[in-house]
Image (cartoon, rainbow, N blue to C red):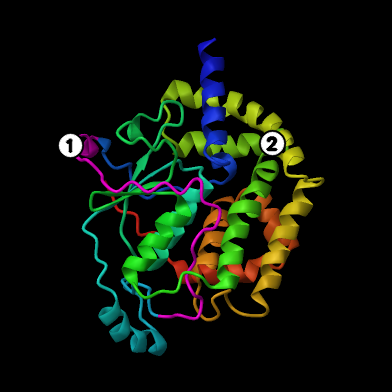
Amino acid sequence: MRGLSGTISVARALRANSTAASTFLRPPRAASYAVTYWTTSNPQNLVDRSNLSTPSVIRSDVIGFRHYGSAAAASPAEQDLKPRISEQNSFNPKEVVLFQYEACPFCNKVKAFLDYHGIQYKVVEVNPTNKKEINWSHYKKVPIVIVDGEQLVDSSDIIDKLVKRIHPDYDLNADEEKKWREWVDNHLVHVLSPNIYRTVSEALESFDYITTKGNFSLYERLVAKYGGAAAMYFVSKKLKKRHNITDERQALYGAAEQWVDALKGRKFLGDLEPNLADLAVFGVLRPIRHLKSGRDMVEHTRIGNWFSEMENAVGQASRMSA
């Protein structure tokens, strides 16, 4: 009975967090940040955009907001931009902490943004069965980002607010970028669950990653891997019906091709540099790249070249050790 209850709790927690189980990030480079820090902190300015339907966006033709903090040699164009970046960007937070599920697509969006901009951050992995790591907050979903003590919630709102701090004059209403950021949240993420849980073997592959990288006890890990995989296999069939998906793989391939068509021959949707829509699509897809569904997607669509360009542009994770 305890095992069944644990399995149901995991499945409910992942489903409740807007298809949080639909993507899986590459293995983290560091252990989770000690949550005890937050027992003496009182994050302020909670922002909840869960009832808003239109996320803000950044104009794709504005260049100069990226942090160039890596050790790699910069191109002449990047060298020319550095003085402008230095002048325009005064955002230099002392501490950024991300509360997440490793399997949450919206958390992965935020991480792609932070990685691309070279903003260092620590991670607190939230246990989806009890969420004790976020008991201090009345907001019970992830991602939650704490920036120097201020709490930000909702992935799109987190990204919007951080971009405005990097460049206060950014126009957050460009039609093309807004359209594709909404497409990620309203369509792309819903295509993923029916694919990664499409068969029993794929569900086990996915939950093997979740239970290995997530915040589970040994007992929870064993129960969740097999019980959770079985539960989500059946849940994925309901999601498939809910979102009017006839063929899971064709829906995934169609979404990938739709995105490539949106590029219109450009390197990125943002032209020479990724914009927020590029980062959102990449953040959601990066974790599944080496699962069977992701391998099939790259093999059977044209998205591979763009994905490789994004990997190069985003670079290494800026996640810090605890």
Residue 192 marker:
none
- Which of the two labelled residues, at mark 2 and mark 1, occupies the earlier sequence position? 1
Percent of width and height locating residue 122 = 31, 49
Does 13 appear above or below 73?
above
Amino acid residing under circle 1: Thr
Residue positioned most to the left: 40
Quadrant for residue 300, please give it: bottom right
Query: Magenta region's main secondary structure?
Result: loop
Residue drawn at x 52%, y 28% as measured from the top left: 10
Residue drawn at x 59%, y 59% as measured from the top left: 182
Percent of width and height locating residue 79 = 34, 86
Quadrant for residue 124, please give it: top left
Answer whether residue 26 is visible to the viewer in this image: no
Quarter of the image with the N terminus is: top right
Nearer to me, 309 or 41: 41
Residue drawn at x 54%, y 26% as measured from the top left: 224
Residue that mark 1 sits on: 40
In the displayed structure image, the side of residue 322 where residue 7 appears, left or right: right
Does 207 appear above or below 162?
above
Does 1 appear above or below 296?
above
Residue positioned most to the top: 1
Residue drawn at x 60%, y 64% as measured from the top left: 180
Q: Nearer the viewer, mark 2 or mark 1?
A: 1
Nearer to me, 23 or 217: 23
Q: Which residues are magenta?
A: 36-63
Residue that mark 2 sits on: 236
